Image: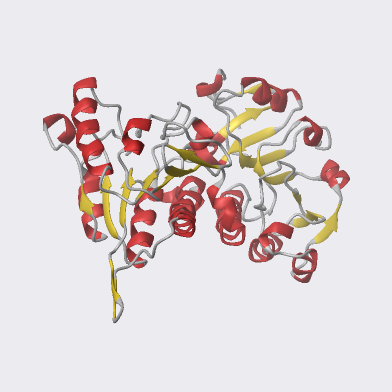
């Protein structure tokens, strides 16, 4: 029998996703892996246990994790879960390591080799393993759907015999993966869409989706993109100019969606109460950075808050609100990464500590925290 993979059921209250789909179980079986899925793991992603069984998985309890070589999860496992895993097991999940040093140390002490999927490098080889992109894409889509559901008018312009309904004005702040999908979704629904971003390259992407680009385009703006493709923090003078332009623009909008999230840092404040107060009655705002403190002043995690007359949507785990789609993509990201650890000839799992994907994502190994960003030293031996 080959290596055993255990697919865990999530225990976090608002986590609806699952780390494997019937498609990825089939793929793991083809790779020579024995797959055990914890009973009920796929319930909220519309995957009954019988669908996993139909493609060759066994259904088990958390106790079955004790014999697993690999544990696949969505969220970082907590203490109650870790005690069920054997020392030396590989755990792959979205680990949320920033600011959680104690939890990461706990994983190391348990002897687990853990991998944080969100630290996957942004290189061509790893595109199909990029969970930040796959999940942000769906979060951007869902943000527009949630806004449309709360906004009590139609989004597209409708010319009817009874009169014309004007198109809703939607402003997307941040044109990364989530922002671009929000723009595309709002455009599909017929809204008049505008967007802003501090990266010059975003202007072309925004325009290609048929939206209007809003930014102070001075010399600082033109030099603003960092090598890693993330937004760089701008000077106070630029931020003031941009804030004035954005404040003026927000006053005319029906829906604002904010997507600015910098890994490991508090979310930048983009929209103040004063800005919200200038918006039209019935306006809606969606904050996709609520898990790191939020981009919008007054946002309440997990709630729709009334802030100066604007309904501010602060749902955490936006991708989890469309769990069936989110799980299918996340599971594919995971199995593609796992496949890189499998020796083609022996079909055994081998950790090559010199592999750039392993180096970038490995948090703990052999009883120690090894990721340099979290106080560890990367190991060079195999």
Residue 45 in percent (x, y) is at 67, 60
What's the residue at 58%, 54% (across, down)?
Answer: 321
State which quarter of the image contains the N terminus: bottom right
Q: Is residue 173 left or right of residue 267?
A: left
Q: Is residue 15 visible?
A: yes
State which quarter of the image contains the C terminus: top right
Nearer to us in this view, 51 or 349: 51
Nearer to us in this view, 169 or 348: 169
- What colour scheme has been applied to the protein in the rendered image? secondary structure
Considering every residue shown, the one lying at the far front of the view is 162
What's the residue at 64%, 66% (across, down)?
Answer: 23
Q: Is residue 366 left or right of residue 125?
A: right
Against 159, residue 351 (above or below) is above
Residue 61 in percent (x, y) is at 86, 50
Residue 281 in percent (x, y) is at 36, 48
Considering every residue shown, the one lying at the far left of the view is 219
Q: Quadrant of residue 230?
A: top left
Nearer to us in this view, 202 or 144: 144
Q: Is residue 305 left or right of residue 107?
A: left
- How many numbered discs? 0
Residue 225 in percent (x, y) is at 25, 35
What's the residue at 77%, 54% (across, down)?
Answer: 2
């Amino acid at each position: 029998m080959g290596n055993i993979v255990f697919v865990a059921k999530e225990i976090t209250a608002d986590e609806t996703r699952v780390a494997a789909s019937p498609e990825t179980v089939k793929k793991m079986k083809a790779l020579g892996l024995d797959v055990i899925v914890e009973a009920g793991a796929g319930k909220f992603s519309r995957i009954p246990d019988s669908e996993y069984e139909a493609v060759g998985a066994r259904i088990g309890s958390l106790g079955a994790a004790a014999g697993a070589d690999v544990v696949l999860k969505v969220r970082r496992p907590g203490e109650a879960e870790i005690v069920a895993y054997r020392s030396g097991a590989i755990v792959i999940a979205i680990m949320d390591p920033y600011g959680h040093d104690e939890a990461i140390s706990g994983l190391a002490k348990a002897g687990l080799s853990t991998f944080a999927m969100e630290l996957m490098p942004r290189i061509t080889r790893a595109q199909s393993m990029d969970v930040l992109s796959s999940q942000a894409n769906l979060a951007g889509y869902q943000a527009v759907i949630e806004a449309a559901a709360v906004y009590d008018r139609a989004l597209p312009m409708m010319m009817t015999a009874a009169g014309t309904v004007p198109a809703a004005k939607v402003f997307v702040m941040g044109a990364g993966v989530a922002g671009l999908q929000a723009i595309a979704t709002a455009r599909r629904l017929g809204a008049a869409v505008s967007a802003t971003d501090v990266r010059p390259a975003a202007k072309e992407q925004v325009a290609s989706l048929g939206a209007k680009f809003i930014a102070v385009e001075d010399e600082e703006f033109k030099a603003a993109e960092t090598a890693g493709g993330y937004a760089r923090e701008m000077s106070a003078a630029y931020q003031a100019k941009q804030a004035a332009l954005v404040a003026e623009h927000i006053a005319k909008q029906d829906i604002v969606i904010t997507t600015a999230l910098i890994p490991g840092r508090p979310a930048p404040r983009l929209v103040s109460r004063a800005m919200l107060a200038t918006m039209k009655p019935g306006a809606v705002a969606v904050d996709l950075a609520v898990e790191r403190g939020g981009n919008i002043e007054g946002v309440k995690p997990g709630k729709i808050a009334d802030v100066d007359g604007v309904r501010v949507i602060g749902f955490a785990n936006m991708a989890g609100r469309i769990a069936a789609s989110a799980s299918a993509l996340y599971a594919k990201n995971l199995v593609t990464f796992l496949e890189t650890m499998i020796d083609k000839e022996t079909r055994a799992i081998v950790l090559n500590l010199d592999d750039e994907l392993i180096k970038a994502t490995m948090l703990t190994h052999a009883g120690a925290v090894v990721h340099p960003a979290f106080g560890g030293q990367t190991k060079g031996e195999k």
